[in-house]
Amino acid sequence: MSSLPSELVEQQKVIQKLAKARGLDFYDTVFEMVNYKQMNQIAAYGGFPVRYPHWRFGMEYEKLSKGYEYGLSKIYELVINNDPCYAYLLEGNSLLDQKLVMAHVYGHCDFFKNNFWFSKTDRKMMDNTANNSTRIRRYVERFGYDTVENFIDACLSLENLIDRHSPYQGKIKSKEPNSEPPPENTIKPSYKIKPYLASYIKAMGLKHKLDPDLESAEPLKPDLPPEKDVLLFLLQNAPLEDWQQDVLSIIRSESYYFAPQGMTKIMNEGWASYWHSRMMTEEICTSSEIIQFADVHSGTMAMSPMGFNPYKVGIELFRNVEQRWDRGQHGREWESCTDEAAKKAWNTNAKKGQEKIFEVRKHMNDVIFIDEFLTEDFCVKNKMFVYKYDQNTNQFVVDAKNFKAIKASFLFQLTNFGQPTISVVDSNFENRGELLLSHTYEGVDLQPDYMQETLSHIYKIWSRPVNLATVLDGTPNLVRYNGEKFGFIQIGEQEKAEEK
C-alpha cells in the first residue's frame, strides 16, 4: 500500500469539497493506493488486512485472484465503515476511474455515518480486528494451530445465527472478551450451569465452576421467548473454555459488524451510485471524459433479465423517489387517482425530492426500502419479472408478471439475507440436557447437507445432542444429531424413521 500521487490528492480535495456542498456528511476518509494482489488480499479479509489467520480467507483470495487473472471480475474500490473511513484505489486504473471511485466512496461514507442501521456498529473496527488477531495468534501458539482452527471452523459455520435486530431493541450485550489471553495456569473448563443441568453435570464428573448460589437459584421460566441469537446463547451457556469463549465472542462481534452491510446492500450501493453519477456528469467530468464515464457507468449498472444488480435497482429507486416527491406524486390524493394519464402528468412542483431521499437514506434498510417504494410501474419500466426454466425450450421464460408475486419474491430474498431463521427453544430438551432449536418455516425446506453440517458444528460447541424442529417435504420433523448419526422423527408420530 502507498499514499496517493499528488494528482489524485488534488482530485480528492476537489471531490470532497463537492460532496460536502451536495449535503453529504462523512467521517474523514483515508485513501490508499494498492496493486491488484493487495486489493484481493484486503477484500478476502473482508476489508481488514490485519484480521486473524484462517484458511477461509486464503480460499477467498484464490477465488478473487483467479477472477482477476481470467478477466471475470475486477475490484475497482473497497471502502471500510470506520472512523476514519479507509478506502483503497487500484493501481493502473485511469484518472477517470479513480475520480469516479472517489465520488462513489464519499457516497458510501455518508451512508455509513448517517444510516440508522449502521448506528450500532463498531467505528474502531480496524483497530479491534488487529487486537482480535493478536489474541487468536496467541491461542494458536498456546494450543496449536489445528485445535484453534477447528474451533474457528465450527464458529464460522454458525456466524449467521445471530439476531440482527437485537442491537436496535436495547438488549443487553454480552460481556466484552478479555483484551489479553488468561495466564496458562488459569485456563480450565468454564460452564455457566443452569440449576436444572447441575445434577447432569455432576453425574458426568465434569469439572466446572458453579455459582455459589446455584442450589438456591430459581430455574428458568418455561415461558421465555425463543432466543434468536444462537451464538449469544452458546456463548453464555455452552461448556467452553475461556479461550473458546473469547474466540466465539470475536466471531459474533464481527458478525454483528457486517450485518448492516447485508441489510442495506441495495440502498448503500444505490446511494453511492446516485451521487457519483450526479457529481461526475454535472461537475467532475471534462468534455473529453463524459463518453468514457458513460461507458464505465453503464457497465456497472447493467442488469440481465434474469439477474439482479443492487447498483441498478438502488440508483433507479432513489431517482424514482426523488422524481415523485419533486412532482408531488405521493399521498392519499395521488394514490386514489384512477386516471392513469392524470397520474403520469401529475406535478405540484413540490420540489421535495432531495429532502425525501436524505430522509430515506437516514431511516430505512433494504426490506423497508423495497416494500415502501417498489411499485408496479417501476417493475414494468425496469423489466423486473419472475423467471422459471422451461425444459421444453431449454430456456428461462417469464413465470409471473403479477406485481404482488414479484414483490413478495423480492422481499423474501432480502428478509434475513434469504437465510433460514433458527432460534433456541430449550436447553434441557426432554430433561436430558439436549439442545432444541426451531426453524421458522416459510415454505422453503432447509438444504439437507447445510442443515446436517450446522447441527454437527453446534454439537461440537454444545457437547450434547442437538435437535431441530423443522418441516421436511411438507411434514413436521424433529432432526436429532447425537455426535455420530442423524435421526429423523415425524412430529406427532411414535415410530422413528430410519436413521441415516
Image: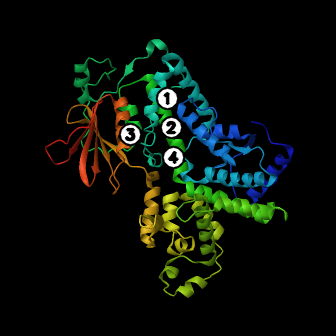
| Residue contact between numbered discs 2 and 3, judged by CB atoms under 8 Å | no
| Nearer-N-terminus badge (2/3) | 3
Q: Is residue 120 left or right of residue 90?
A: left
Between the C-alphas of marks 3 and 1, the distance is: 17 Å
**In the rendered image, is residue 80 in sight?**
no
Q: Amino acid at mark 2?
A: Ser
Q: Quadrant of residue 455?
A: top left
Is residue 371 shown above or below 205?
A: below
Measuring 47% from the left and 52% from the top, which residue is drawn there? 417
Q: Give the number of the disc on residue 230.
A: 3
Residue at the image point whose x is 37% and y is 30% from the top: 461
The residue where tag 1 is placed is 177
Cα distance in 3D space between marks 1 and 2: 10 Å
Residue 178 position, x and y percent, is 51, 25
Q: How is the image coloured?
A: rainbow
For disc 1, the neighbor class at 10 Å (few under 14, some 14 to 19, many from 20) is some
